[in-house]
Image (tube, rainbow, N blue to C red):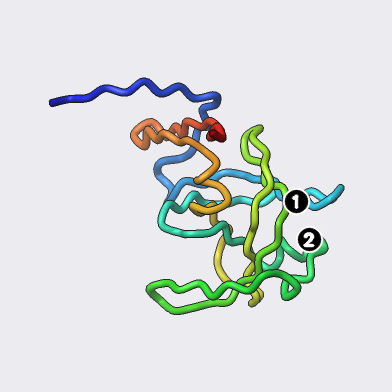
Amino acid sequence: MVMTFDISFDRSVAYDPGLPGISMTVELKLGSVVVQAPAKIDTVSSHCIFTRYVAQELGIEVETGQPLLVSTVTGNFLTFGHTLTLATEGFEFDSTIYFMSEEGIGRNILGRLGWLDRMVIGINDYYGILYLKQHESE
């Protein structure tokens, strides 16, 4: 039995399917300070994780946040969570973003808690199009 579903989206965003992963520019806001940063969508990551450099640009003292030890296949690293405003492609909401304790590690990640749980996404990787709409609270 085949089931069909109707889903509508508010935005479509082009990305380069020839590059590794799906990247987009996001804005992190803390008060009047706004920092733009590239980030990759990662449906396996449980949290949104950004580099220490982004926290410093926002004026955040990283270690004052909620600690979270993140485990990966290659090892563990310590992060600290801070609540701020996350904006992507015209969608904006408060989110807890975890910043890496070490400098020079990794990339910025849009994970399940804090981004993916607030969005509905569709992906057409053949054409390099990401479809987005904000999840409606019930």
Q: Left or right: where does residue 122 sit relative to residue 62?
A: left
Say which quadrant the C terminus sits in. Answer: top right
Whole-percent x and y of residue 124?
A: 37, 33
| Residue nearer the viewer, 26 or 91 | 91
Q: Which residue is labeled 2 in the image?
A: 57
Which corner quadrant of the image does residue 91 belong to?
top right
Above or below — where is 115 with respect to 122? below
Q: Residue 75 in the image: x percent, y percent?
A: 44, 79
Residue 133 vertical position relative to residue 6 in the rendered view, above or below: below
Q: Which residue is mark 1?
A: 35
Q: Secondary structure at mark 2?
A: helix
Q: How far, Cα to Cα, is label 1 from label 2?
A: 7 Å
Q: Residue furthest left?
A: 1
Residue appearing at x 57%, y 57% in the figure:
48
Residue found at x 56% / y 47%: 115
Name the residue: 79% across, 70% down.
61
Q: Position of residue 4 (x, y in %)?
A: 26, 22
* Dot 1 crowding, Cα within 10 Å, few <14, some 14–19, many 20+: some
User: Mark 2 is on which residue type?
Assistant: Glu
Number of the label disc, if any, that sits on residue 95: none
Mark 2 burial class by Cα count in 10 Å: few <14, some 14-19, many 20+: few
Q: What amino acid is at disc 1? A: Val
Disc with the residue nearer the chain's start (1 vs 2) = 1
Labelled pair 1, 2 in contact (Cβ < 8 Å):
yes
Question: Does residue 90 appear left or right of residue 128 in this picture?
Answer: right
Q: Position of residue 84 (x, y in %)?
A: 73, 53
| Image side of residue 9 versus residue 99, left or right | left
Quadrant of the image for the N terminus?
top left
Secondary element type, mark 1:
strand
* Picture residue at 79% right of the left edge, 48% below the top: 34
